[in-house]
Amino acid sequence: MLHSNIIGYLQTHSHRFLDELKEFIRFPSISAQPAHTADVARCAAWLAGHMRRIGMENTSLIPTKGHPVVFSEWRRASGRPTVLIYGHYDVQPPEPLDEWRTPPFEPVVRGDYLFARGATDDKGQMFAHVKALETLLAVDGRLPVNAVCLFEGEEEAGSTGILRFLAENGDKLHADLAVISDTLMPSPERPTVIYSLRGSIGLELEVTGQRHDLHSGQFGGMVRNPVQALCEIIARLHDAEGRIAVPGFYGRVKKLSDTEKRYMSETGPSDAELLENAGTEAGWGDARYTLYERTTVRPALTVTGIAGGYQGPGSKGEIPARASAKIDIRLAPRQEPLEIECLFRLFITRTTPPEVRAKVSRYSSVSPVEMNPSHPIYRAVVKACLRGFGGKPLFRRSGGSIPVVTALRENCGIPVALLGFGLADANMHGPNESLYLPNFIRGMATSIHLMRELGRFTT
């Protein structure tokens, strides 16, 4: 249990913690939009200043070709393990704005929830660890472990900067465990540790035709419309059963054992739960697999955006010269991003109508990752969850992708604990994103318990 001084500090300063989180959230740190580059930089500077104020050391802004990495550490626990805490201070674009009940960067508390962009993904979850560090330093004057914090500003735009940093400096970090809170839990009382992530490839497919837009009355019926051609290509990406129709796509997909299928069935969300969280009544996809399996151990290909032609009010009689689509491919365990991208490009070449031209551009690529939940370090994670949340954590797979997880494992050899404090209905990436505030407090307590439990180990 936490001693009374720790509990007292958390209780006394809880309102300040929330006010500081609101201040953090007010920065519209949208990494993918160049118009917000200055906002991302201001957010990074604020976060670095905050780390200095709570007593962390050697804090700096590490420049990258994109947005800076906030680095901070405390390494005075001689002979004790080192914990690396990762998070990201950048956020998704807030559109569609008209679906927000309140402005996305003006955090509002309604009941037990804080509503704002970044509340759960990832400022709120990350800040729980920051406040845990502050509490231990303020009350005990030291940490029970060595701590390294890496907070990036490009997770929502491909993590290019921190991936390069880890490739060049990963061997110097020397951490025994990386803790990342950027995932979800099914209910407030049931903490969850993620042990598998899908990989991802972000692509743009552009189809071009004639040199310029044409009058649809004068030329309609005699030239191939790039928008129509794009739609025809997209329609061929899946078969009638919802399977991806790219030849060879499933060649490396791992086949689940009966034991794994049973475990997933016993610990994972039901189809009804997933449909409820998605806000829909009907599922889609390969009917041979449950919805949980489809979103975690099976690949997916999703058209996330499409553009072409006139989008304003009324009509405009034109044949557009180009059309484009954003393609998000999620990779199952054992699939190789480069191989899948090559298969996709070959498929596009073969299915593009001869009257138009197609171009595929890649803007992100992440390998899938699986972790061993029986690793001894996870025993400390389980104990911390029991004490912070009062319940034993579930070990689940996730359909999401976190680029830095693969880098931490491959470049640094560090085991990773994906310990999320967000709820399944937090609406990450959507309008009215929220953070369940009791979990903000429980997250702090869990982080404190984890550092103390790890502090029992010697190195």
Image (tube, rainbow, N blue to C red):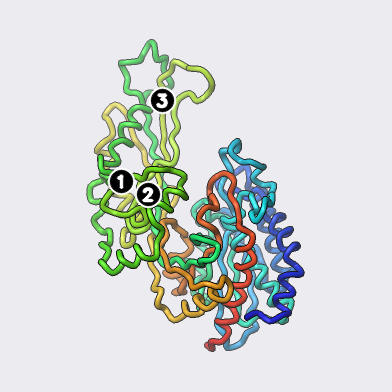
| Amino acid tagged 3 | Ala
Q: Residue furthest top?
A: 218
User: Residue at point 42% right, 60% down?
Assistant: 398
Q: Quadrant of residue 455?
A: bottom right
- Label 3 vs 2, first from the N-terminus: 3
- Calculate the distance from the C-alpha at mark 3 to the C-alpha at mark 1: 23 Å
Q: Kindly identify the amino acid type of the residue bearing the numbered disc 1.
A: Phe
- Which of discs 3 and 2 lies nearer the camera? The answer is 2
In this orientation, which residue lies closer to the viewer: 228 or 124?
Answer: 124
The kind of secondary structure element at disc 2 is strand
Residue named by callout 3: 321
Q: Image point 37% across, 56% down: which residue?
A: 292
At 49% from the left and 73% from the top, the residue drawn is 392
User: Which residue bears the numbered disc 1?
Assistant: 344
Kindly identify the residue that appears in the image at 67 percent across and 42 percent down. 103
Spatial separation of the CA atoms under disc 3 and disc 2 = 26 Å
Q: Are the residues tagged 2 and 1 within 8 Å (C-beta)?
A: yes
Q: Which x, y percent locates residue 275?
A: 42, 48
Left or right: 453 in relation to 226: right
Asked if residue 172 lies left or right of residue 133, the reply is: left
Whether 200 is drawn above or below 62: the answer is above
**In the image, 119: left or right of 418?**
right
Q: What amino acid type is highlighted by mark number 2?
A: Ile
- Residue 148 position within the rendered picture, expressed as x and y whole percent measured from the top left: 59, 73
Residue 329: image tag: 2
Q: Earlier in the sequence, mark 2 or mark 1?
A: 2
Mark identifier at residue 41: none
Q: Is any atom of residue 361 visible in this view?
A: no
How would you rate the neighbour count of disc 2 (Cα within 10 Å): few for under 14, some for 14-19, many for 20 or more? many
**x then y, percent, for residue 302:** 38, 44
